[in-house]
Amino acid sequence: MMKPVAHLLIVVVILSGLALAQNTKRSNQPQDPDLVRLGTIGVNLPVSVLDKKGRVVTDLTKDNFALYEDGEPQQIISLSKEDELPLNLGVLVDASNSVRPKLKFEKDAAMNFLDTVVRRGQDLALFVIFSSRVELLQDFTDNLEDLRDAVFSVKAGGPTALYDSIYRVCEEKMPTAPGRRAIVVLTDGEDTASRHTIDEAIEMAQKAEVGIYGIGTTNAGPFGVARGVKGAPGSKELNRLAEETGGKTYFPAELAELDKIFADISAELRGQYVLFYVSTNQARDGQFRKIEVKVVDRDDVRVRVKRGYTAPLGESLL
């Protein structure tokens, strides 16, 4: 059982792959075993490609991409598409006092999202709430009825520890989950109670290969009475969490937009690519490595990817 944390509704979808092969039915790693040796620094990199209208582009191949680490070109060993890898989805719900009037809408939308995204026998989801503490109400499962029981058991009360919830889910639950990982954060305000900083939360998410999708509902009225505002409390922090990890933020004008937002996130996750490469820099120096991905000979698309990762620290196993 996870220990206490604090306030906000967050849906977490976790995107990643492991560099080493897994002896598990759900694991389907994209890398070529002939090119990867034990101890090498290998990176599985979830990538979203969108056209000018924001639609997911799904017809690209490995040769369409160019990848750079700290400005140095990298060889892309393999490309996998979403249906070739399991999805590990975490749903974190803000259960603070301030979400009480919106809680029913948020729970309904979150459950509709789970119904749409989780494929039985292939994907897994967990459900966490946080207010004055972080609670794991349902561990990884593909049983939608168990997830439904967890979602609709939520009651509001307490402050907000957004960064703690992200940090702990990424640290304690995501590293052992084979396949893709991501986080969707549904919150109505800024962090007020975390012991971890936003920098620590971002670093842990990058380390666990987790993309964060943030939904800020501070000014979203149940029936569109208030308008969503990007400058609302906590919006700057949500934007940063998403940008640093390859996710996206949404600021709905009304709670009725949540279903559309979740559908957009679902479409993006289903259309993602996972690029695998072995870094040309095998130094285990604990330093941050900046990543850049481009689509070759296409100026009508944009790429969304995490900004980088922190290299492991210690001596090489080779």
Image (cartoon, helix red, strand yellow):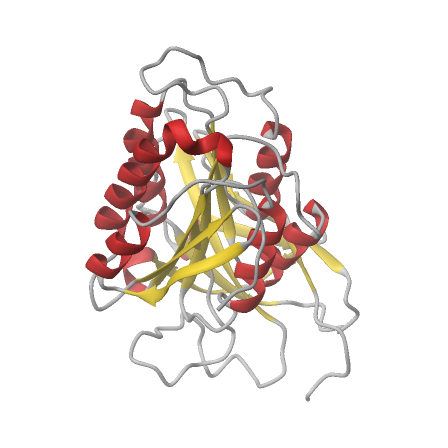
**Residue 266, quarter of picture:** top left
**Which residue, as the protein is rendered here, is positioned at the far top?**
225
Can residue 229 be spotted in the picture?
Answer: yes
Relative to 260, does residue 49 appear above or below in the rendering? below
Q: Position of residue 7 (x, y in %)?
A: 54, 42
Horizontal side, residue 189 vs residue 250: left or right: right
Residue appearing at x 40%, y 35% in the figure: 50
Q: Residue at x 21, y 68 (%)?
A: 121
Instruction: Tell which of 282 and 237 is nearer to you.
Output: 237
Is residue 241 rendered to the left or right of residue 312? Answer: left
Nearest to the observer: residue 52 or residue 238: 238
Position of 265 compared to 122: left or right? Answer: right
Q: Quadrant of residue 274?
A: bottom left
Q: Is residue 290 visible?
A: no
Q: In this orientation, which residue lies closer to the viewer: 16 or 291?
A: 16
Residue 223 at x, y = what percent? 31, 16
Q: Is 134 placed above or below 238 here?
A: below
* Image coordinates for residue 279, horizontal then vertical, percent: 64, 67
Task: Return the x and y of residue 241 as percentages of the image width and height.
Answer: 60, 42
